[in-house]
Image: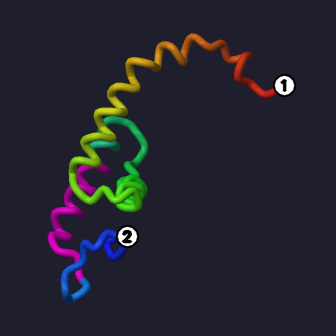
Amino acid sequence: MAQRGNLLDENGSLPRLGKALLADSTATIAGAVLGSSTTTSYVESTAGVSAVGRTGLTAVTVGVLFLLSLLFSPLAAMVPAYATADP
């Protein structure tokens, strides 16, 4: 993923790897404390890099869109289960 996003230095190593691993482990611990499943930051990072989003702005945009989708969740909850279930 880092190679595809041109994030490697001239030696082929990832700069600031310690900070990236610290962020990943902190998110995993926070998710466990809050009772959610473990985070999948690798999948989101891969999707962002494949869409040519290599800055933090990509993550902020996705976060804002997820928060915006919370406004529409009551609308989705109005659809009865039998309308979406397989026959």
Q: Nearer the viewer, residue 12 or 30?
A: 12
Range shown magenta: 13-29
Q: Nearer the viewer, residue 46 or 42?
A: 46
Q: Residue furthest bottom?
A: 11
Residue 13 falls left or right of residue 51: left
As helix, strand or loop, the secondary structure at mark 2 comes to: loop
Q: Which residue is mark 1?
A: 87
Residue 80 falls left or right of residue 16: right
Dot 2 or dot 1, earlier in sequence = 2
**Scheme of image coloration:** rainbow
**Residue flagged by tag 2: what amino acid is it?**
Met
Query: Magenta stretch containing residue 18, yes or no?
Result: yes
Q: Which residue is mark 2?
A: 1
Secondary structure mostly taken by the magenta-highlighted segment of the chain = helix
Residue at left offset 20%, top offset 89%: 11
Q: Crowdedness of circle 1 by 10 Å Cα count: few (<14), some, many (20+)?
A: few
Residue at left offset 84%, top offset 25%: 87
As helix, strand or loop, the secondary structure at mark 1 comes to: loop
Residue at left offset 20%, top offset 60%: 22
Please say if 14 is above or below 79: below
Residue 60 rendering spot, x and y as whole percentages: 24, 42
**Residue flagged by tag 1: what amino acid is it?**
Pro
Residue at left offset 27%, top offset 56%: 24
Residue 54 rendering spot, x and y as whole percentages: 27, 59
Q: Nearer the viewer, residue 51 or 65?
A: 51
